[in-house]
Image: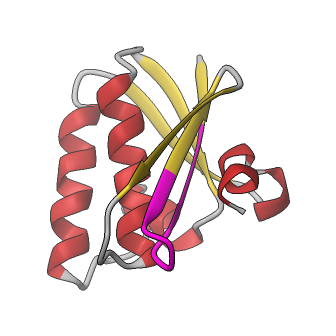
Amino acid sequence: MTDIFVDGSGKTGRYAYVKDNKVKIFQKKGITNNEAEYLAVISALKENKDRNISIYSDSQLIVNQLNKRYAIKEDRLRKLAQKVWELCEGRNITFIWIEREKNLAGKILG
């Protein structure tokens, strides 16, 4: 099982993931915090083709939406979630909420 930590900040437009202590940071202007969180997940899944991945995020909303516990009311987020689910097809991907202090990606973004 591969562990990947993700985080995003709409304030700065930065989002990142951490895998095996290696950091990948991205930037996109004009996005919300939730969009940044989703883009971090999408980037991690696109760039890591492992079949078994645990994705750790400190966003309860994103984790619960991707685990289909919460409805997704915003169209922009629904489209991003659909992209995540497409990237998960044929793979064993789990989404796990963790406290902000334990999120390695969050420590990078500050």
Where 72 falls versus 89 (above or below)?
below
- The stretch of residues the image draws in magenta is 5-15
| Residue located 50% across and 60% down the image | 63
- Residue 51 in the image, given as x and y percentages of width and height: 39, 15
Along the viewing direction, whichever of 53 and 20 lies nearer the viewer = 20
**What is the quadrant of the C terminus in the image?**
bottom right
Left/right of residue 107 with respect to residue 15 in the rendered view? right
In the figure, residue 58 lies in which quadrant?
bottom right
In the rendered structure, the answer to whether residue 103 lies left or right of residue 72 reads right
Magenta-drawn stretch contains 56: no
Q: Is residue 35 left or right of residue 10?
A: left
Looking at the picture, tell me which residue is in the foreground, 18 or 3. 18
At 54% from the left and 41% from the top, the residue drawn is 17
Q: Quadrant of the N terminus?
A: top right
Query: At 42% across and 73% down in the image, what residue appears?
Result: 34
Q: Nearer the viewer, residue 69 or 44?
A: 44
Would you say 54 lies left or right of 86 here?
Answer: right
Name the spot of residue 53 as percent of width and height, x first.
Answer: 50, 26
Magenta-highlighted stretch: main secondary structure? strand
Residue at image point 42% right, 68% down: 13
Residue 22: x %, y % from top left: 63, 25
- Residue 7 on the magenta segment: yes
Residue farthest to the bottom, as pictured: 73
